[in-house]
Amino acid sequence: MIPSSRLFPTPVLSLLLWALWILLQNGFSIGHAILGAFLATVIPLATYRFWNRQPDIQRPGKLLRYMVIVAWDILLANIEVAKLILGPQRKLKPAFIEVPLDLVGDFPITILASTITLTPGTVSANVSEDRRHLLLHCLRVEDEKALIQEIKTRYEAPLKEIFQC
Amino acid sequence: MTLPFWLEILVSTCLILGSLFALVGSFGLARLPDFYTRLHAPTKATTLGVGGILIGSALYFSHQDFNLSIHELLITIFLLITAPVSAHLLAKAAMHQELPQMHGTQGEALLKAQGHSQVQSNERQAEEKKDSEKGGDSTTASHKIT
């Protein structure tokens, strides 16, 4: 997205750190903007050797759309899980499900797993060692195939597009 | 500095809704039958619970200090990043300990297969580490990690 240079080996991380520093001050001032810029330069320079190279975000627009969808799903997930908690326990139909992964790369898989944990009735429990399967625990499963299909089309497909992998 | 009435209503609605969801989350922690189902309560109900309280707080302090209060946004983001990670680790730990599941949980075979292979591979890695330490050959170990 933004070419990396010697001074900024990870430009996106630098930008994020700078924005984070300014947000932490809860108010804008030139002094803190400069201090933030200094930290945003020094911290990546000191740490980037420890980081594995991760796929870049290729489609920031799609990422924004993805975040809106996920935020909405989190809202629904909360209501749904609240209903299951308060409702009778015989309605629970917990199950372990294995979802085959098409995504590659640790970072995209992490995002997918986190999204799954935050959305309706599913918690990601394990990634198989070859990074091809994700083990989920679900609170209530009616149709296993449909659930897997939904996860693949709703979350995995957009992530594939965002990271182009 | 007093709030206008409509804002007061809005802030208190956010606070009450948030607390309700937090309450349901903690209630679930006490009520659900096994470890895995209990994991669902704190990862979901609480995000909206804390979210509601934070929105209320952001509204209140934005009005109080005459500028936008964005600390709350940061708290929300960090919460959304960290909640799934801790849930994932808890689930993994539960799998290693082979905690019992609720009666009627489907797909236990998957759990056993994956949990078992994980334990085995950990043992394998430990053995390899031992071997490499003995032989002083660090290339195999570093290759494994990457």
Image (cartoon, coloured by chain):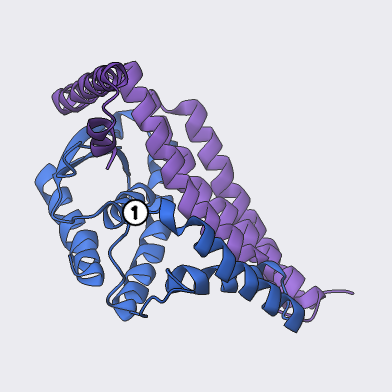
A59 to the left or right of A104: right
Percent position (x, y) of residue B17? 59, 56
Please state which of residues B46 and A158 is positioned toward the viewer in this rendering. Answer: A158
Percent position (x, y) of residue B16? 64, 55
Q: Is residue A82 at all visible to an observer of this figure?
A: no
The colour chain A appears in is blue
Q: Quadrant of residue B35?
A: top left
Count how many numbered circles sit on residues in the image. 1
- SS for dot 1: loop
The colour chain B appears in is purple
B122 to the left or right of A24: left
Q: Circle 1 is placed at which residue position?
A: A52
Percent position (x, y) of residue A57? 31, 71
Q: Quadrant of the N terminus of chain A?
A: bottom left
Q: Quadrant of residue A91?
A: top left
For residue B144, above or below residue A25: above
For residue A48, above or below residue B65: above
